[in-house]
């Protein structure tokens, strides 16, 4: 059974939407989607901070059959959905998208772009911090935190590349923001992948972090004003801390003048900003034709100072 975890960057007031998408295994049994205020590792009572639980049971064909929120201590509140649509709109081996919209009084849940149900809030949704997905899915390919209005598909997510994962948030990364990922890269020796940070208005890449297993090289570069890349701007110094098929952790800190990058808890390098007038709010991971990259978790943190960022993520 797979587990994926995402941590939001900011509080979630009314008018925001959480989007999580990926691909279901070919012979699934169950998938659970949880929205909560607590990391499951921080409490044995995992239901304590639960806001919403969506269950999909493929064997019973009851699919999305309940939404859950804790009531009084030791008690559970569960609501059985009644829908005129299919009991289970998700299909084995196919892609899926859950959209959880935070309206003024309730969650509005969409499955594969179709509304499926609503659930009234029992506590303010701004306390939401984590979204977790458990069960029989192959991988998660997108995790977004957006505003419902204006409804626009960000330029940063338009790409002809082979996208393995993408995420955007409803505000720009401030100084002190840390983006931490757990990933596994698989494929033949020619495998390569990139992690890109982009401006939310122009789509221009401020940092392209490219890992090439064939050359055992990590290249850092940025797009010029004409959206081209120049070999003269590339940085390739440093060790090669990645192994195909082995989990790695990577963190990107937004400093005052540069990205600060750590791999597996150790300082790796920095990359100076090409210019200062930009607003990053999007992350995109791509691979070449033979590569495969799975993002196991994504967490956003906002540290009050660069020094604290160093202490927490680069030791």
Image (cartoon, rainbow, N blue to C red):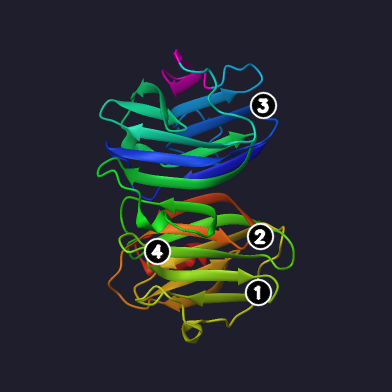
Label 2 to label 1, Cα distance in Å? Answer: 17 Å
Which labelled disc corresponds to residue 240?
1
Disc 4 versus disc 2: distance between alpha carbons?
22 Å
| Left/right of residue 211 with respect to residue 195 in the rendered view | right
Q: Earlier in the sequence, mark 1 or mark 4?
A: 4
Circle number at residue 139 = none
Q: Depth check: 190 or 179 in front? A: 190
Categorize mark 1 by other alpha carbons within 10 Å: few (<14), some (14-19), many (20+).
some
- Calculate the distance from the C-alpha at mark 3 to the C-alpha at mark 2: 28 Å
Range of magenta residues: 64-84
Q: Write the residue at 64% across / 35% down.
A: 93
Q: Residue 29 carries which label?
A: 3
Q: Please report the residue visible at 68 percent of the width from the left and 75 percent of the height from the top.
A: 216
Rounded to the nearest angstrom, the CA distance separating label 1 from label 4 is 24 Å
Disc 3 or 1, which lies upstream in sequence? 3
- For marks 2 and 1, the one nearer the N-term is 1
Q: In terms of sequence position, does the residue under pointer 4 or pointer 2 come before the other?
A: 4
Distance of label 3 from label 1 (alpha carbons): 39 Å
- Residue where numbered disc 2 is placed: 291
Picture coordinates of residue 59, whole percent (x, y)? 66, 20
Label 3 and label 4: CA atoms lie apart by 37 Å
> Which of the 4 image quadrants contains residue 206?
bottom left
Give the mark nearer the N terminus: 3 vs 4.
3
Are the two marked residues, 4 and 2, in contact with CB atoms closer than 8 angstroms? Answer: no
Q: Provide the residue designation for mark 4.
A: 198
């Amino acid at each position: 059974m797979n587990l994926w975890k995402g941590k939001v960057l900011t509080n979630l007031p009314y008018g925001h939407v959480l989007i999580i998408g990926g691909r279901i295994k070919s012979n699934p049994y169950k998938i659970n989607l949880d929205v909560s205020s607590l990391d499951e590792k921080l409490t044995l009572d995992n239901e304590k901070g639960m806001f919403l639980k969506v269950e999909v049971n493929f064997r019973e064909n009851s699919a999305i059959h309940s939404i859950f929120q804790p009531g009084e201590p030791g008690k559970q509140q569960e609501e059985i959905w009644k829908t005129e649509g299919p009991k289970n709109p998700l299909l084995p081996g196919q892609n899926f998208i859950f959209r959880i919209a935070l309206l003024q009084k309730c969650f509005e849940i969409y499955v594969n772009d179709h509304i499926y149900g609503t659930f009234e809030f029992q506590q303010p949704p701004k306390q939401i911090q984590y979204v977790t997905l458990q069960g029989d899915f192959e991988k998660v390919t997108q995790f977004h935190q957006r505003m419902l209005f204006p409804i626009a598909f960000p330029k940063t997510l338009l790409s002809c590349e082979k996208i393995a994962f993408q995420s955007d948030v409803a505000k720009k990364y401030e100084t002190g923001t840390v983006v931490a990922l757990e990933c596994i890269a698989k494929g033949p020796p020619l495998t390569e992948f990139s992690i890109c940070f982009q401006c939310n208005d122009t789509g221009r890449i401020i940092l392209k972090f490219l890992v090439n297993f064939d050359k055992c090289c990590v290249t850092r570069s940025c797009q010029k004003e004409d959206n081209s890349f120049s070999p003269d701007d590339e940085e390739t110094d440093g060790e090669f801390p990645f192994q195909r098929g082995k989990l790695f952790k990577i963190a990107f800190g937004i400093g005052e003048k540069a990205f600060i990058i750590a791999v597996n808890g150790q300082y790796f390098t920095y990359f100076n900003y090409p210019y200062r007038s930009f607003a990053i709010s999007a992350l995109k991971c791509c691979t070449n034709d033979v590569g495969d990259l799975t993002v196991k978790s994504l967490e956003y943190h906002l540290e009050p100072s660069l020094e604290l960022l160093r202490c927490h993520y680069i030791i």
